[in-house]
Image (cartoon, rainbow, N blue to C red):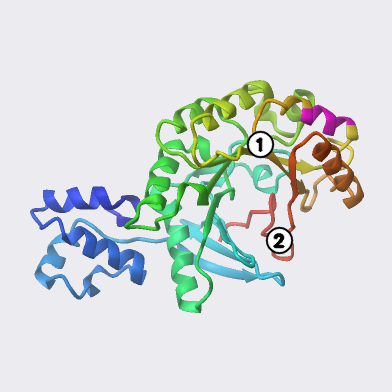
Amino acid sequence: MNLLSINYRKIFFLLIILGEKSFRAKQIIKYIYSFYSNNLNLIKNINKKILKKITKIIYIYTLNIFKIKYSYDGTIKFIMGINKKIINTIYIPEKKRFTLCISSQIGCFVGCNFCYTGKQGFNRNLNTSEIISQIWNIAKFIKKKNLNFITNIVIMGMGEPLLNLKNIISSILIMRDKYCFNFSKRRITLSTVGIIPALNKLKNFVDIRLAISLHASNDKIRNIIIPFNKKYNIKNILKSAKNYIKNSKANKNGVTIEYVMLNGINDKYKHAHQLAFILKNILCKINLIPWNKFNKSEYKCSSYKRINIFSKILIKYGFVVIIRKNRGIDINAACGQLFEKNI
């Protein structure tokens, strides 16, 4: 069993089943998440005979890092491999915040038209150890390079996390485990286009910050740019999101509404007024995202002037509006750019 797929509690009971003292669980997990070594035989405070016994059952297997790309703005893109398929994980340093953007799928099942990842199709879901391995690998890299440790996790990389619900939930439990990464609920954000059945289930298992990839103020536009909207429309998505944050401590300041700015598509001033109307009863902040280009796309980014006026319209309605800064564009690490050819 890969130790990156289970939390402290499961390691605890696994050792009991193996006939070992339960305190060994803390020794093992401290080694895993302090030294970031995948060789359990190097644990110094456990007898070699015991190690030989338990390593027949438990092990640490991580994704391979095939390439690392550095942006002029400090963003780092990690290209990791899984059976000749790859995923992207992005480290985004700021003054007081050091964010890791992780992936949940190889490719993406949703297929948003404005997203390069979505245009490439879907391969498969990542399992729990593959999701956690992204954080573990970068944490190891950060420690070795003496960089600032990760403060925030955003599940906004390749894939739709709520179409991989079981593995996402188990991964979040590991992220939050005080003996593992010990991230608080307000330091983890999950972004979804709005898979309603999964979102309704999520609240029963974990409380984390929620971001809705809305990107349109009406179903007519959203049906075109996010075909999945034909299955789960805006009204029902917002109803589900409102229900999720109702008793959520992580979202006490509201859900984040993500809105990519597409020139001539969803950026007209009437769209800003429509957006304000449909969000009037939802506690939220709005994140306007300048669209990031990729080859052979018919879309263009809205002008800065257009984005700024769009923002001001929403602010007049009383919304908190943030215009996202583009990071890692030169290494294709920005929002909607994640994809690499097979290794």
Q: Amino acid at mark 2?
A: Arg
Q: Work out whether mark 1 precedes mark 2 in sequence or the reverse, and give the earlier one.
A: 1
Between 222 and 224, the one lying in front of the other is 222
Which region of the structure is painted magenta?
Answer: 270-276
* Mark nearer the viewer, 1 or 2: 1
Residue at 61% x, 37% y is 254
The verdict on residue 60 being magenta is no
Q: Which residue has dot 1 on it?
A: 284
The verdict on residue 275 being magenta is yes
- Residue 16: horizontal and vertical position, in percent? 12, 51
- Residue 12: horizontal and vertical position, in percent? 20, 52
Between 95 and 37, the one lying in front of the other is 95
Residue at 50% x, 25% y is 197
Q: Which residue has dot 2 on it?
A: 327
Between 269 and 50, the one lying in front of the other is 269
Label 1 SS: strand
Q: Which mark is residue 15?
A: none
Q: Main secondary structure of the magenta part?
A: helix
- Residue 123: horizontal and vertical position, in percent? 53, 44
Point out the image quarter for the C terminus: bottom right
- State the image quarter where residue 274 is shown: top right
Residue 249 is left or right of residue 1, and the answer is: right
- Residue 75: horizontal and vertical position, in percent? 64, 66
Location of residue 143 with respect to 323 vertically, above or below: below
- State the image quarter where residue 256 is shown: top right
Label 2 SS: loop
Residue at 25% x, 48% y is 9
Q: Amino acid at mark 1?
A: Cys
**Gap between marks 1 and 2 measured at Cα:** 24 Å
Between 228 and 25, the one lying in front of the other is 25
